[in-house]
Amino acid sequence: MCQTTHRIMDSLTVSTMWGMLGQNKSWVSEFILLGFSSDPTTNSILFIVFLLIYLSTVLGNGLIIMLVCLDTQLHTPMYFFLCTLSLFDMSYVTTTMPQMLVHLLAHSQTISFAGCWLQMYVFGALGITECTFFVVMAYDRYVAICYPLHYTVILNWNLCIRLAAGSWICGFLSSLLNTFFTMSLPYCGPNRVNHYLCEGPSVRSLACMDTHILEVVDLVLSVILVIIPISLIVASYVHIAKAILKIKSTQGRCKAFSTCASHLTVVTLFYIPATYIYMRPNSSSSPERDKQLSLFYTAFTPLLNPVVYSLRNKDIKRAFVKVMFYGRWTGGPQW
């Protein structure tokens, strides 16, 4: 009889605990994104600045997509990957910028729990996708410089499409796992996120339970998704450097290096702040500094990509002049 009573009490206790946990998890129905400032004047200035950045990013990357699609002379693996990168960047800024612009002018800076979940997932998915896609672009430069005579044979259209699709799949599956664990935590207390978007570490700090294990898992995932791509990119450029040094003419060396300089610039701008934010202990984090650093890969890198890739690229300039000023092109997309 006593044993039966104890079992009933234990069962009730466990049920009560799970019930309380479920109530706590659903208690926070929305989050408040604090953004950059509470001063209306400062927010108005920031609104103008970020609006210009967003419009320039969409127009610049959209222009590259249009030029690559319209000009058949740009239908090569290199420009296919550049077109895909521009699509990533347009999607990336659209995930965060429109909502941030609204919050800069609106009195309410709330985002629903489901909206936060969705933004965190898509933002993380696109970020991971871009990490892996930079490896694909490094491999493209490696084949072009180390095996120029076999470039189009090795990087045929079937392989190009599979590499691009693989980057998308890797990003969206990896982000699903991380986002699910983060948003399954109990959020029963404060709901003010010290950020301008729902980014994993900022939201996770509000959970009303110990997240140490999840932080360790997150760190391991960061190592896999950041260090491994960086290592592959470095390995590719080591081989590229060796190949360039074997070129006898100075002009040939400069031409070969110039095709890699744009990619190296963009990779540096993207990886340095992302590595700093996601690969350090949370105890050493500074929300204000993290917000500023995250702008490099959420706003500035997508903005600079079209500039970096087009200023020193004669093919892009030629296609732009042909389409914009002469109003003609050499047919539609023939991938």
Image (tube, grey):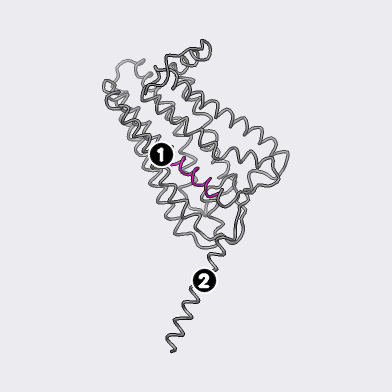
- Span shown in magenta: 116-131
Q: Is residue 124 magenta?
A: yes
Residue situated furthest bottom in the rendering: 1
Above or below — where is 290 with respect to 21? above
Residue carrying label 2 = 17
x, y percent for residue 312: 46, 19
Question: Image check: 55 left or right of 168?
Answer: right
Residue carrying label 1 = 168
Above or below — where is 66 with respect to 324? below
Element on which disc 2 rests: helix
* Quarter of the figure with residue 128: top left
Picture residue at 46% right of the left edge, 85% below the top: 5
Q: Is residue 167 magenta?
A: no
Say the numbered circle drawn on residue 189.
none
Q: Main secondary structure of the magenta part?
A: helix
x, y percent for residue 226: 41, 43
- Indicate which disc, 2 or 1, sits on the residue closer to the N terminus: 2
x, y percent for residue 106: 69, 42
